[in-house]
């Protein structure tokens, strides 16, 4: 074969070759569907804004639920992969719905307070009144029932309890309907309520004690099938929460609060002070408060009569392995 013919063949070959062996395409980000209550979790908002989700190869679609029933349904029927809400909802999914759900991360303890109409000055003043909650048999409704039980008031005989949706919706309802005497609220809604003249009759921290509130929970099967994606998601969440709790980022976090919660700067500053600078708000590294969760189970046993009054061990509902793997991943990046 002549040199000229050989060169022609080489040119033709190399013209085709790059189409077959070019640089490998970067894998697409793992999409995770999140349902949450109330609103979007601020660490997820921060992780998205800071590029942390992208760093860990995660793409998150958050669908805030109007109430806990809708949130639990979304997780149970598979239309959401991860739920962020008060973790007693995970217990309810297991015990009331028969779902195979596990808690995989904490995030916040409870800063809830019992907020009531301005003319009510004591818990005894709630006798014969109507109170409102998200749902009447989970999470913050149980906090409310316990606080009233401490003063001898029982739901049904002594007061009515009605479902009314997420915390911001309950403040709107109390503004518009004076017959709704009170509800449990946390910041920033509790701060807004007090600014408007609603009265606090006590906090969960003072009257009930430690309480593991906001956390993440998933279907056990989904966690096993998406182990790596879940670990990367939790790592991104933890890193974002670390960023939020760093004093140097205070003004940036306040700006996120203003934008996300549609609140004024002074309300956002007070919310930051409560959630991050105070005690009982955001937990370091989004850690799970085991003692606070034992109190969650104890409250359900006492108030709802679950498990014939004797709560089970926390391990039935909480699996720390994914969280620990996320911490290890973060440690490995240092």
Image (tube, rainbow, N blue to C red):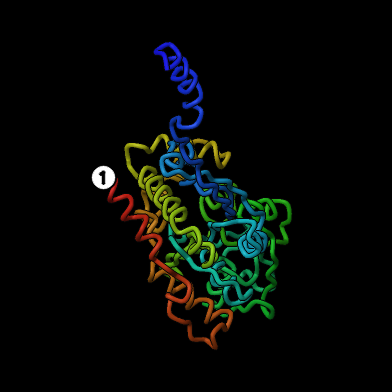
Residue lying at the far front in this picture: please name it: 1
How many numbered discs, if any?
Answer: 1
159 relative to 249 in the view: left or right: right
The quarter of the rendered structure image containing the C terminus is top left
**Percent x, y of residue 96:** 62, 76
Above or below, comparing residue 40 to residue 120 in the picture: above
Residue 122 is at least partly visible in this image: no
Give residue 3's quadrant in the image: top left
Residue lying at the far left in this picture: please name it: 334
Helix, strand or loop for disc 1:
loop
Give residue 83's quadrant in the image: bottom right
Q: Residue at x 52, y 86 (%)?
A: 309
Q: Residue at x 60, y 78 (%)?
A: 153
**Percent x, y of residue 270:** 45, 44
In this view of the protein, which residue sits in the foreground, 9 or 278?
A: 9
Label 1 neighbour load within 10 Å: few <14, some 14-19, many 20+: few
Give residue 152's quadrant in the image: bottom right
The quarter of the rendered structure image containing the N terminus is top left
**Percent x, y of residue 230:** 46, 55
323 relative to 146 in the view: left or right: left
Q: Report the residue marked by disc 1.
A: 334
Q: Residue at x 44, y 19 (%)?
A: 10
**Percent x, y of residue 13:** 47, 23
Q: Residue at x 67, y 74 (%)?
A: 159
Above or below, comparing residue 300 to residue 321 in the picture: below
Residue 104 is at least partly visible in this image: yes
């Amino acid at each position: 074969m002549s040199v000229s013919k050989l060169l022609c063949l080489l040119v033709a070959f190399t013209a085709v070759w790059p189409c077959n062996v070019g640089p490998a395409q970067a894998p697409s980000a793992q999409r995770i569907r999140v349902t949450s209550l109330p609103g979007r979790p601020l660490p997820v908002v921060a992780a998205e804004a800071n590029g942390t989700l992208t760093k860990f190869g995660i793409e998150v679609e958050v669908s805030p639920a109007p109430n806990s029933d809708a949130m639990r349904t979304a997780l149970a029927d598979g239309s959401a992969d991860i739920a962020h809400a008060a973790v007693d909802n995970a217990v309810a999914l297991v015990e009331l719905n028969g779902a195979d759900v596990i808690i995989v991360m904490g995030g916040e303890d409870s800063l809830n307070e019992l907020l009531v109409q301005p003319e009510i000055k004591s818990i005894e003043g709630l006798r014969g009144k109507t109170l409102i909650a998200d749902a009447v048999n989970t999470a913050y409704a149980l906090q409310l029932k316990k606080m009233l039980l401490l003063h001898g008031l029982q739901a049904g005989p002594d007061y009515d309890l009605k479902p009314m949706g997420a915390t911001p919706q309950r403040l709107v309802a109390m503004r518009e309907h004076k017959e709704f005497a009170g509800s449990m609220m946390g910041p920033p809604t509790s701060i807004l309520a007090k600014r408007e003249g609603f009265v606090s009759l006590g906090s969960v921290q003072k009257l009930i004690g430690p309480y593991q509130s906001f956390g993440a929970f998933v279907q056990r099967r989904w966690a096993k099938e998406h182990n790596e994606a879940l670990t990367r998601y939790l790592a991104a969440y933890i890193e974002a929460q670390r960023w939020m709790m760093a004093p140097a980022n205070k003004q940036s976090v306040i700006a996120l609060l203003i934008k996300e919660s549609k609140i004024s700067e002074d309300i956002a500053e007070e919310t930051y002070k409560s959630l991050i600078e105070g005690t009982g708000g955001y937990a370091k590294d989004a850690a799970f408060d085991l003692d606070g969760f034992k109190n969650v189970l104890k409250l359900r046993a006492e108030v709802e009569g679950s498990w014939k009054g004797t709560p089970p061990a926390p391990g039935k509902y909480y699996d720390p392995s994914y969280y620990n793997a996320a911490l290890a991943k973060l440690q490995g990046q240092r």
